[in-house]
Image (cartoon, grey):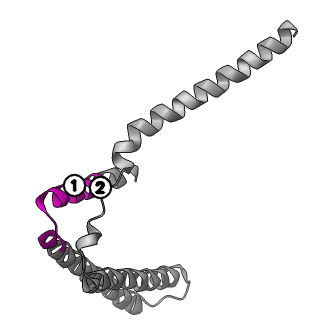
Amino acid sequence: MTNRLKNIILVCSLIFNITFITVFIQRSCTQELESRPPRPYRNISESKRRHFREIHKMRSSYMEVKKEFLTELGKTDYDKEDLEIMLENLIDMQQEIEEKVGQNLIELRQILSDDEAEKLFEYMAKRTVHNRKRR
């Protein structure tokens, strides 16, 4: 092998190794936030799971109304009274969702063991802070 070919192979190898090490370090540093606690859902009855599906449906309909609201805001011939009614509807929907989520979390806490609850809610708190920092 010529020296030039050896140097090319050496440079490629170094780039590959540096990339691998960088990705490994990055993943190990962010793994704490990304790793999820054990899912506590094994203790949740089907009726409780139904509540989670309800919240998902509520959020979906909220997003549809919000999209309509934003579309109306973009129109040149908007009606301020209609926009205010839509805004009040959005606020009511969001409040209803937050109340439902809060009640479900309280019910979930009653089902979980102390250890499960600590892990889950600590994880949720970290994710809340992490998501807020990303914005």
Residue 91 seen from this side: no
Q: Which residue carries the number 2 mark?
A: 37
Q: What percent of the width, then of the height, locates residue 64? A: 46, 84
Q: Quarter holding the N terminus?
A: top right
Q: Which mark is residue 108?
A: none
Q: Is residue 82 left or right of residue 103?
A: right
Q: What percent of the width, then of the height, locates residue 15? A: 66, 24
Q: Residue at point 38% right, 88% down?
A: 86
Q: Residue at point 79% right, 17% down?
A: 8
Compare residues 38 and 121 and report the one nearer the observer. Answer: 38
Query: Which residue appears farthest toward the right when viewing the image?
Result: 2
| Highlighted magenta segment, given as a residue range | 108-128
- Could you say which quadrant of the image residue 52 lies in? bottom left
Magenta span: helix, strand or loop, mainly?
helix
Query: Which residue appears farthest toward the top when viewing the image?
Result: 3
Crowding around mark 2 (Cα neighbors within 10 Å: few <14, some 14 to 19, many 20+) is some
Image vertical order of residue 108 relative to residue 117, above or below: below
Q: Residue at point 41% right, 36% down?
A: 28
> Is 115 covered by the magenta stretch?
yes
Q: Which mark is residue 119?
A: 1
Q: Which of the two labelled residues, at mark 1 and mark 2, occupies the earlier sequence position?
A: 2
**Kind of residue at disc 1:** Lys
